[in-house]
Image: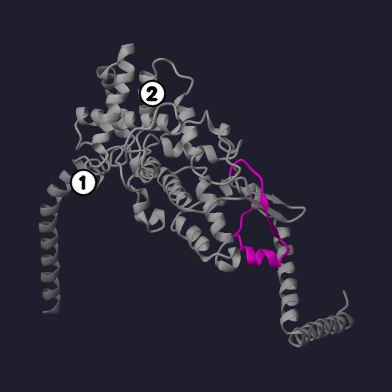
Amino acid sequence: MDNNRGGRQATAEKHGIELMKQQLLPSMSQDIEVAPKLLTESAGESSCSIFRVPQALVGGIAQASWPRIVSIGPYHHGEPRLQMLQEHKRRYLHTMLDQTQPHGIGLEDLINTVALKVEMIRQCYSESTECFSGPDLVKMMVVDGCFIIQFLRQSAGVIGMDPPLNNLYVLNSVARDLLRLENQVPYFVLQDLFETTNVPKATWSLANLASHFFSCFDLGPGYVLERQINIKGVHLLDSFRLSLIPHGQQDNPVKKTLYCKSIRSTSKLHRVGIGFKQGQASTFLEIKFDSERRTVRIPQIAIDDDLNYILTNMVAFEQCHGQKDGHITTYAAFMGCLIHTADDVYNQDVARFFDDVCKDARIDVCETYLASHFSFSEESFKYERAHLCWAQLLNAFHDNPWSALSGLVVVVTLVGIIQTVYAVLQYYHPK
């Protein structure tokens, strides 16, 4: 009876599985064939450079990549909260055409310039842009691209500042929005539109204008304008990122064979004799380690609202784009290792900032520009551990000399006992 019941149960299970397969096979096969609606096919390719930012990659503050006052590109296009400047974009386009039409460059030329690269533009976005037709996408790129170019010209003083950018709050808000990851257009769109509208030929190139724009952000006293004039990234945010990378590091990947270890906080490193000094450099990324003096030189950096959102968006870009160098992420992660608490920096807000900006970010320090400065050998690591033990003993003696002395007596006694046992063993069991 039990065998019959078990057989009937097995038959029923097989029948149920067959019914399930008949229901699932057609729908799942159809789902597989349907092209993705949200992600583009190029989402994992190198051509893809403008991303919707996962919340975890920006320290739990995904809003850092969202525009506050002006939308650029397709991700936030048409949002009601960003409509104030939409009309002014068309005004900027009108102003640009007033400058170019006397030289034979009209609106049709701008449309032709962008229309030739519609598919290239779509491949730059991780999220599908198919909700925008070809003409709609071209219109968006022309309007937004010309707005950016005119804004850069105004920032550099090449042309006069038009309303509403005379308002300092609006001006600063627009400047920040142009460096948010979800608010980018491909750099080649800006370059093509700039070359088309650069009549008569001006002494300022697009790279010059972008360079001047980046220098408006206070990232420290050493930031040098001239060092990044010829740098062209995949968009404005990437161009700014590249301008911060020390010379000789962009095309010089570090081998994985270097020895790497977790970096301790400044307070712990101080106890093993490693000092910290303010360094002079053209970018805050140029951190140096002097192995002879055991001193870390870190350039001064202005930690404010600008740095907060700029670093956050650059880290998000490196994580989404799969940047092999990961310079900004490495810097932020390294500073986060050094600064755990207010004891390490005398400011809890600074400690919290570096902890948040790299939350959930992943970086292989062995493959980054800091590896050559902070990859200790196994011998120096052993020395450091011995140095740390000695420093801890000195600290204990300072806090409680009698307790420390008693601990030292115990150690000396143990050493004596071990030596005695070893001598006895040598006597009875000579080699």
- Is residue 397 highlighted in magenta? no
Rendered location of residue 73, percent (x, y): 29, 37
Residue 91, above or below 283: above
Residue on which the image places disc 2:
194
Q: Secondary structure at mark 2?
A: helix
Please state which of residues 304 and 259 is positioned toward the viewer in this rendering.
304
How far apart, in angstroms, are the residues tagged by discs 1 and 2? 29 Å
Residue 50, above or below 349: above
Q: Amino acid at mark 1?
A: Pro
Rendered location of residue 68, percent (x, y): 32, 48
Question: Left of 259 or right of it: where is 196?
Answer: left
* Crowd band around label 1 with a 10 angstrom C-alpha radius: few (<14), some (14–19), many (20+): few
Residue on which the image places disc 1:
80
Residue at point 20% right, 31% down?
136
What stretch of residues is rendered in magenta? 258-283
Question: Left of 426 or right of it: where is 234?
Answer: left
Q: Decide if residue 116 is in sight here.
A: no
Residue at point 74% right, 77% down?
393
Indicate the quadrant where residue 12 lies: bottom left
Report if the CB atoms under discs 1 and 2 are less than 8 Å apart. no
* Crowd band around label 2 with a 10 angstrom C-alpha radius: few (<14), some (14–19), many (20+): some
Indicate the quadrant where residue 94 lies: top left
Indicate the quadrant where residue 145 lies: top left
Residue 131, above or below 27: above
Rendered location of residue 353, percent (x, y): 48, 59
First reached walking from the N terminus: tag 1 or tag 2: 1
Please state which of residues 414 and 99 is positioned toward the viewer in this rendering.
99
Q: Decide if residue 355 is in sight here.
A: yes
- Is residue 261 highlighted in magenta? yes
